[in-house]
Amino acid sequence: MEVSMTVNGREVTADVEPRTLLVHFLREDQRLTGTHVGCETGYCGACTVHVNGEAIKSCMLLAVQASGANVKTIEGLADGETLHPVQEGFWERHGLQCGFCTPGMIMTSVALLEENASPSEDEIRHGIEGNLCRCTGYHNIIKAVEYAGATMRGEEPPAPDWEGGE
Amino acid sequence: MATTISALGGVIRRREDPALIQGKGTYVDDITPLGTGFVAFARSPYANATITSIDTSAAQAAEGVIAIYTNDDVAHLGGLLAQVVVAKGRPLMADGKVKHVGEAVAMVVAESTYQARDAADLVEVDYEPMKAVVDMKEAAADTSLVHDDLESNVIVAWEAGPFGDEEGIAATKQTIADAKERDDTVTVSVEAVNQRLIPVAIEPRSVLAEWNGGYQRFRVHSSTQFPHALMGAIKTTFGLDANQVHVTAPEVGGGFGVKLNIYNDEILACFAAQQLGRPVKWTETRREAPFSSIHGRGWVATATITGTKDGEILGYELDAIADMGAYEQNFTAAIPFLGLFVGSGQYKFPTHWKATCVFTNTMTTDAYRGAGRPEAAYYLERIIDAYSREIGVDPVDVRKKNFIERFDEAVVSPIGFAIDTGDYATNLDKLVEVSDYEGLKAERDAARADGRYVGIGITTYCEVCGFAPTALSELGFSWATYGLPAGFYGTGLVRVNPDTSVTVVTGTGPSGQGHQTTWSQLVSDRLGIPVEKIRVIHGDTEESPMGIGTFGSRSLAVDGTATFDAAERVAQKAKNIAAHLLEASAEDIELDADGGHVVGSPDSSIEWGEIAAAAYLPHRLGESEIEGGLESHVIFDPPNATWPFGAHLAMVEVDPETGNVEILRYMTVDDCGNIINPMIVAGQVHGGVTQGIGQAMLEEAIYDEDGNLLTGSLLDYPIPTASDVPMFELDHTVTPTNINSLGAKGIGEAGTIGSAQTIVNAVVDALEPFGVKHVDMPLRPRRVWSAIQEARS
């Protein structure tokens, strides 16, 4: 059946099987492979995208359920060559290792900071606990979100806690 | 070694990250060539059964199905290759019987993944189920056999120390028996389970195979840590040469050992691609991953210490049974052997260490982060803690009393292996100092007086990594079955291109460890060319002449060293060329980002572009006898493994009403030798510790008595979330190794090896007022609460 939606600012229309998950529609029909499939059951969060401004796990939604929606994926986050502050934060504070959970983690973090501009450590932890990372132990993800929050508020980001400085 | 390395301690942002944070990284499942057929497997619902019939007709008729294969179609290829199979390897698909739930019985290739999965459900298989062997102790007792064509479930028993010396082992046992007889000694025993784990890399495994019948070549993308071994397994299975199989591991989304194996699905995808003449892709679902990818750990053991009442340990004994699952794969029965290496940890006391490896009707176990060493460290550090508690001496003092003293040249451990360098007391002293251990104890005691249950766990570990020497291959660690040189070398190729950019090729297969960044730093350190102009290629069997992948915390110490040494040779050659062009002596040339300069003569310089041009246009080198080209390829075959070490401390609080454990502080003082990029090293420790905390507090693969996995989803098998771990407090000491030019030892697994027992020791300390002596992992609230109730009653 036919679905139409806005993906990263572009109107798209496609003919899909009714059971097609939104994540498969994005990856396979739209070739937006930055959104990853980690579990297909809503636990890991690797497939997190924004639907009408809200972070959702795109394996938990059928493509047809997103018909008419405004969808943003990791590919649509940067402003041209200018990275989003959260992307900068993850790069500056080593918030990723293998990078597989990263697009979902970043999309969740962006939504978190849009809702709460200066979250505490606990609020960040709670805000991203639906996104699993097996590499970082979350320590540097917290630091990355703190870095991004500070730059978005126009403040100096906290210094890194490893030896050797910036 | 006298090399001065300016790259040491330099933090630069990772070169890998711009792609990964923008969704521009390419993982295997992101690659779908036109005409790809998609694979799904029909899997066994039984743990032990005979297959009486397989009917694929309904599946064959399903929409979109291209082909269906069973073992009859692939039996001629032989079984799945493994580096060593002691007793029973895995068939490519079930050969008339199934030996664990989820074993692949039939393979469906269809036009879409959805169609393949639908059709796999239509494969009709009749089974005659038999009794499953699940319990390790029952397996070791051979009350029922996993494989009825074998005489025993026992595959092998590893015993030390010293390893390989029967008389020495008998003498050690006698020494310990004599110590037990003494009046002034106590003997403390703990039986503990080091539970089976599911690795859970967030990227499920994926393989894409293409066959070109014209060139007679395979092109394979796989999410593997070990691309050369996969190339070797494919070439050997299909009777091809190395240059007919090109394997690439693109971005790999976490490894932790689970992607170190060669898997039947990788070989089967190649088979189907060759049969069908079209690309064939299989991507694991999370639901099937516990049945298609290896598990880790799975030991039950009794650890015993005999020592004086003032803390001098006279003997340590470990008697372990290790669960290998139903079939041996890449390293399976060798994993407990890796534990044996470090069975005596940082200590000098006589050690009798034994692990018996048994088959059960469960998924194969193999390397999961730490691989044998977390198990070994767990038992050793748990029983030292129990012994310290028994004699009432601080566990720090007991450890220090029994350490091997500082050594700068190799010493042989009680297990019988030569350790490169170590300074254990200094390391533990540093943890005591930076943690304010005395202050923490006072804090704990004050909390206790206040009716709170706060505990401190402190432990040490000795790692073995940077795997070498090649002589190990004689013990069965060997890639010879894959048609590869059997040894533990590393490779690095450094090439300055004509435009002065640099291409580096290495034999590793990273999955998040940042090799592009660290290797760039090493090469820039030697050449002076900035890291932005250096591209590092890894995980590709056609680009890299050889390599044995990324595992066992070995990449920097072995392949990194090879790359560093290759860069040094290129630097020497560049100096020779510059000296020739400047009519100076090569000893007087210094390299930097601009080119070569004669020391002390600011006007006597030559740009990199001129040096490179002369290298590629060797007529400019005239009579100098310098050959053309500006590259070097070094293979480093280290004389020994490296032996990092460290000490961990955890402070926890237990809620006695619920059994909930909260981690208040977690501190590490690791010693991994010289550190190149502290940011990347810190990241490895954070992640490693978190996986150890996962084992200590959350994770457990549970089979019922019929061999059904009860914890197959991320709901039943929770891994740590951001809310389960604290911020980590890291420090280190630096004791360089003397077996490589970097002085680097390795850090990838250290966090995992040191952490689970640190948490358990802390929880047992917190529960001391109740008299709790041990609680088995994972320390979920119910288990902790039950331990309190039991101790109370």
Image (cartoon, rainbow, N blue to C red):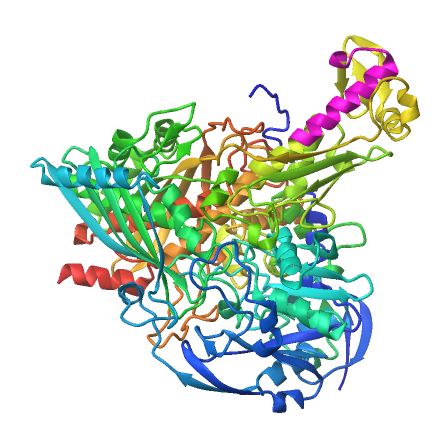
Across and down, in percent, residue B655 comes to 28, 57
Q: Quadrant of residue A113?
A: bottom right
Residue B258 located left or right of residue B324 = right
Task: Note whether residue A159 is visible.
Answer: no
Residue plotted at (58% across, 19% down): B2
Which quarter of the rendering shows the C terminus of chain B? bottom left
Residue plotted at (39% across, 27% down): B423
- The residue lying toward the viewer, choosing from B172 and B116, is B172
Q: In which quarter of the image is residue B419?
A: top left
Which quarter of the rendering shows the N terminus of chain B? top right
Across and down, in percent, residue B512 comes to 60, 49
Across and down, in percent, residue B321 comes to 31, 57
Residue B160 located left or right of residue B276 = left
Question: Is A16 a magenta residue?
Answer: no
Decide whether the magenta segment is chiefly helix, strand or loop: helix
Identity of the residue furthest to the top in this view: B600
Residue plotted at (62% across, 31% down): B10
Residue bounds of the magenta highlight: B565-588
Q: How many marks?
A: 0
- The residue lying toward the viewer, choosing from B1 and B309, is B1
Question: Is B579 a magenta residue?
Answer: yes
Task: Note whether residue B197 is visible.
Answer: yes
Q: In this rendering, is residue B228 above or below B38?
A: above
Q: In which quarter of the image is residue B120?
A: bottom right
